[in-house]
Image (cartoon, helix red, strand yellow):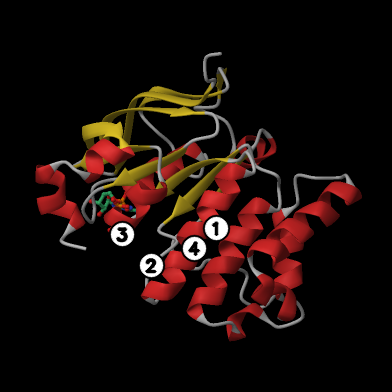
């Protein structure tokens, strides 16, 4: 049977004042895949995720979630429809405890049993968060805050999880852990869109990848093909 399209993005354009950050992005995300968005600093990766989650406005193009047009919806509505974002820079509620942060992530849910199951899921991925559930989040390490941001995004049972640079500033061993968990999240049925600087490691767990340059898609293809593309290896992948 054919795979369903979870997210369909066509000709997306976004500007910040005079700066056009996205100049017409096309992107298709199939249900159950991990899709990597790669590219240099300032290419427009974060802007793409922010636009999908509705926290910034666009000028042109459309975004469809399972065929439903969400282009102009409010962020809260988009979250209720099943898109959840883990922002760059460990943006957790610093004054709240770990448990309170996770509870806040479940704001779209009423079903207590489902919320309980989501706590279980997050604590299974990140046991350190359960150990520290009563700790104020500002006192967590950088890596733990990153885990909390991902965990919070998972608490709403998203159909599509958007991850903005989950490995930023983390030690190599923790980066490996995070990538392994992203793979597990996918294997449990959540579609994932992941923005990363860490291209080589991300392509290992991704199904498909897009490279964004100056607000446009310059290349896209199966992750395994992109990982072997000599031009990409030169530009983004380094020699790992
Ligand atoms: P990085 O890897 O450095 O996070 P990115 O690919 O995620 O980069 P974006 O953050 O999407 O890039 O930024 C795309 C462009 O839009 C950049 O030129 C950036 O300077 C600009 N930009 C982003 N946010 C704003 C803003 N709030 N106001 C003005 N310009 C912005």
Q: Look at the image and tell me whether residue 20 can be seen.
A: no
Instruction: Tell me residue 91's x, y (percent).
Output: 53, 66
Mark with earlier residue (3, 4): 4
Tag 3 or tag 1, which sits nearer the N-term?
Answer: 1
User: Contact (CB < 8 A) between labels 2 and 4?
Assistant: no
Q: Of discs 2 and 4, which sits in the foreground? A: 4
Q: Nearer the viewer, residue 71 or 174?
A: 174
Q: Nearer the viewer, residue 14 or 239?
A: 239
The residue nearer to you, when weighing 204 against 156, is 204
Q: Which residue is denoted by mark 1 in the rendering?
A: 181
Give residue 198's mark. Answer: 3
Report the residue at 49% width, 63% height from top. Answer: 178
Q: Residue at x 28, y 55 (%)?
A: 200
> Which mark lies nearer to you, 1 or 2?
1
Which mark identifies residue 178? 4
| Outermost residue to the top | 1
Of callouts 1 and 2, the N-terminal one: 2
Could you tell me which residue is drawn at 64 percent across and 78 percent down? 137
Residue located beneath label 2 in the image: 168
């Amino acid at each position: 049977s054919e795979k369903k399209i979870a997210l369909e993005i066509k000709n997306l354009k976004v500007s910040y004042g005079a700066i056009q950050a996205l100049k017409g992005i096309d992107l298709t995300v199939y249900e159950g895949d991990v899709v990597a968005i790669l590219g240099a600093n300032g290419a427009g990766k974060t802007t793409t995720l922010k636009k999908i989650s509705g926290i910034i406005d666009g000028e042109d193009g459309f975004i469809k979630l399972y065929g439903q047009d969400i282009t102009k919806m409010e962020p809260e509505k988009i979250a209720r429809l099943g898109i959840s974002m883990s922002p760059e820079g460990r943006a957790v509620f610093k004054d709240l405890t770990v448990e309170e942060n996770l509870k806040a992530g479940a704001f779209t849910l009423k079903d207590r049993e489902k919320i309980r199951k989501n706590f279980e899921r997050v604590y299974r991925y990140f046991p350190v968060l359960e150990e520290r559930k009563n700790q104020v989040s500002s006192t967590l390490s950088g890596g733990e805050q990153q885990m909390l941001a991902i965990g919070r995004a998972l608490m709403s049972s998203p159909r599509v999880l958007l991850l903005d640079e989950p490995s930023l500033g983390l030690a190599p061993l923790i980066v490996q852990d995070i990538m392994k968990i992203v793979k597990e999240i996918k294997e449990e049925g959540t579609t994932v869109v992941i923005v990363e600087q860490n291209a080589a490691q991300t392509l290992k767990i991704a199904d498909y990848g897009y490279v964004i340059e100056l607000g446009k898609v310059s290349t896209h293809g199966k992750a395994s093909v992109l990982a072997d593309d000599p031009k990409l290896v030169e530009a983004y992948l380094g020699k790992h």
